[in-house]
Amino acid sequence: MYEDRTYRRSVKAGGLFPFTVVVKETDLFILADRDLAELAASVVIKHRHRLETYIGMHPDFLTSIVPLNAVTGAPEVVRRMADAARAAGVGPMAAVAGTFSELVGEALLKESSEVIVENGGDIFISTKTERVAGIYAGDSPLSGRVGVRIRPEDSPIGVCTSSGRVGHSLSLGLAHAACVLSPSTALADAAATAVGNLVKGPDDIERALSFAMDIPGVTGVVVIEAGRIGAMGKVELTSV
């Protein structure tokens, strides 16, 4: 997850209405047919309350860096995070941003024909027109110059990016950007963390790409380290 959200200034709405929703640490930038901020906020508040209540009873869910099983009867937000983290081999909080993007996006799709929800670099996209998701990679010379083309037939899709050099989220690697695509935004988020953890330098790119594609549900991956880039799977790179 990215803490610096200045990249939002370069977003092109493409005929959609842009708005933001902020609830505590959850800071969403949303594009939809119209202003649905009130609905989006209500979804965030509901799921944050359920997640916070669960963490209050199971504090290791907040701090673990290895997968944890959700207890029987756990709320949906917890189950999605736990399932995604287990598939990627990381702690459940590695999936929190993508899970909230996904839950909000799914709710807004009941009121809007197209929805894009961005949460610190973790994006849920449901679109009827071709879009490009740019990859922000800190001080890499490729940052903001490369994007992933998203076609309508491939959405809804999650496009999530982790970095060992940008933001304050925990990463055990040094990748400028590890971007993962999956029909599950929660999984894309967890997998991006797992992929980023593997990259200590440019020579690790190929191994990280192969690792990502071995995760069930991952459809594509892009890794940027310094001035080098690698991609694998169903991913179409384009200049931005």
Image (cartoon, rainbow, N blue to C red):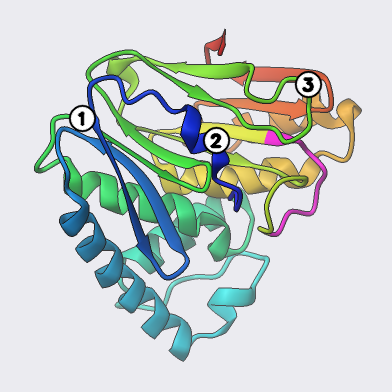
With respect to residue 187, does 214 lie above or below? above
- Coordinates of residue 221 in the picture (x, y in percent): 60, 27
In front of the other: label 1 or label 3? 3
Residue of label 1: 114
Q: Left of 90 or right of it: where is 156? A: left
Q: Are marks 1 and 3 in contact (CB under 8 Å)?
A: no
Q: Is residue 234 visible?
A: no
Residue of label 2: 7
Q: CA distance from mark 2 to mark 3?
A: 15 Å
Looking at the image, the residue that sits furthest to the bottom is: 57
Instruction: Give the quadrant of the C terminus.
Output: top right
The kind of residue tagged 1 is Glu
Q: Give the numbered dot on residue 141.
A: 3
**Which residue is depicted at the point 17% across and 58% down?**
38
Q: Earlier in the sequence, mark 1 or mark 2?
A: 2
Nearest the eye: 212 or 180: 180
Q: Earlier in the sequence, mark 2 or mark 3?
A: 2
- Coordinates of residue 22 in the picture (x, y in percent): 37, 61
The span shown in magenta is 170-177
Q: Is residue 222 visible?
A: yes
The kind of residue tagged 2 is Tyr
The kind of residue tagged 3 is Pro
